[in-house]
Image (cartoon, helix red, strand yellow):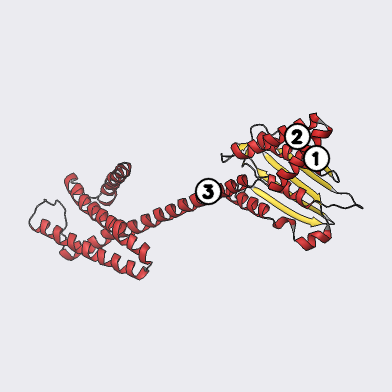
Amino acid sequence: MRKFFLHFLFWVVFFLMWNRIMYFYVSNVINRLYFSAWDVSLIMLAFYIIYVYIMPDYFRRKNITRLIMFSMLLIILLSGAYAWIMGVFLHHYVMPIHFDFLWTYADLQYNRFFVALPGVLGGCFVKLALDRIEVRRKMEMMEKEKSQAELIYLKAQINPHFLFNSLNSLYTQLELNLEEAKGTLISLAELLRYQLYECDADFISMAKEVTYLESYFNLQSIRNDNCTADFLINGNYEGLVIAPLLLIPFVENAFKHVSDNDVRRNFIKIRLDFVDGHLHFFCGNSVDVKSNIQSGNPSKGIGLINVKKRLDLVYRHRFNLKEEINNGEYHITLTLNLK
């Protein structure tokens, strides 16, 4: 019903504009309405035949020659039919014409041809434009569904190795320090609750994401006692939102590939700086050069590939991601516009 009303409104406005622009020189109001009605009805008929039948046929067959042939045939048939009908009307004086000049049948037919042409072209262009919009809408829906599917995958991908190590650390703490064990258990429960139940929305509070990162960082730091681990936050992130679980693969990657060297410093450094609605995220860790050569680049992990795809889908041109490996250190820097 809404579409019908929009079409009806458009043709009413088009009729009034055509009447004023094309027949401004006709002083008789009845004659202006009469010829405007013929013209607009011809344009409408040509438009909807192209829109409903010929263009869908073109989309199915993808044959431009067939489209041109049908369009030209439609113009010839409609212009000829309208010229004949109007000739009959003029011959029998169905509508008195108060012009100071005479139209011949040839003039009338020639004129109908150019009146039908805008209807055919309009039908083609409108259908192409709407088809393009529909294709773009479907592509955006597919991209959104793909992004949601990847998010579901990330949520479901609770690393069993991480859980196993966390529970082992918790068991050791229960024997040595009961208070620390309670804190570890609370952190683990909060981390799992956030990952399972609070990440259904497209965006989530930056404060919750930071808390999640800190909990994960603290749990991993318990078992990585052979390296220096720093987690720094600067700036105000109140009111900011972010796509959930976007940063965690970088942190996971750091703990997974951190070096285990007895003769040089092993480190993990996470830094989040918030400046004017922008997040500047830095994640760095030392790597064992030999093991890195054997196992491959740490930036090629599935988790990092997924997060790069999500960045492209969710933030498009509002982020900048850089990676580098140099002198046994792996650095990743992400600048993200959170406004």
In the rendered structure, find residue 241 and report the number of the disc placed on it.
none
Amino acid under disc 3: Lys
For marks 3 and 1, give the one nearer the viewer.
Answer: 1
> Which is nearer the eye, 280 or 86?
280
In the depicted structure, whether residue 186 falls above or below residue 337: above
Q: Mark 2 and 1 residues: CB-CB less than 8 Å, in contact?
A: yes
Q: CA distance from mark 2 to mark 3?
A: 36 Å
Q: How many marks?
A: 3
The image position of residue 305, as x and y in percent, is: 65, 55
Closer to the N terminus: mark 2 or mark 3? 3
Amino acid under disc 1: Ile
Closer to the N terminus: mark 3 or mark 1? 3
Residue plotted at (73% across, 37% down): 215
Which residue is label 2 attached to? Answer: 184
Residue plotted at (19% across, 64% down): 80
Residue plotted at (84% across, 47% down): 267
Q: CA distance from mark 3 to mark 1?
A: 37 Å
Q: Residues within 10 Å of mark 3 (few under 14, many from 20)?
A: some
Q: Residues within 10 Å of mark 1 (few under 14, many from 20)?
A: some
For marks 2 and 3, give the one nearer the viewer.
Answer: 2
Dividing the picture into quadrants, the one containing residue 1 is top left
Closer to the N terminus: mark 2 or mark 1? 2
In the rendered structure, find residue 222 and report the number of the disc placed on it.
1
Which residue is label 3 attached to? Answer: 144
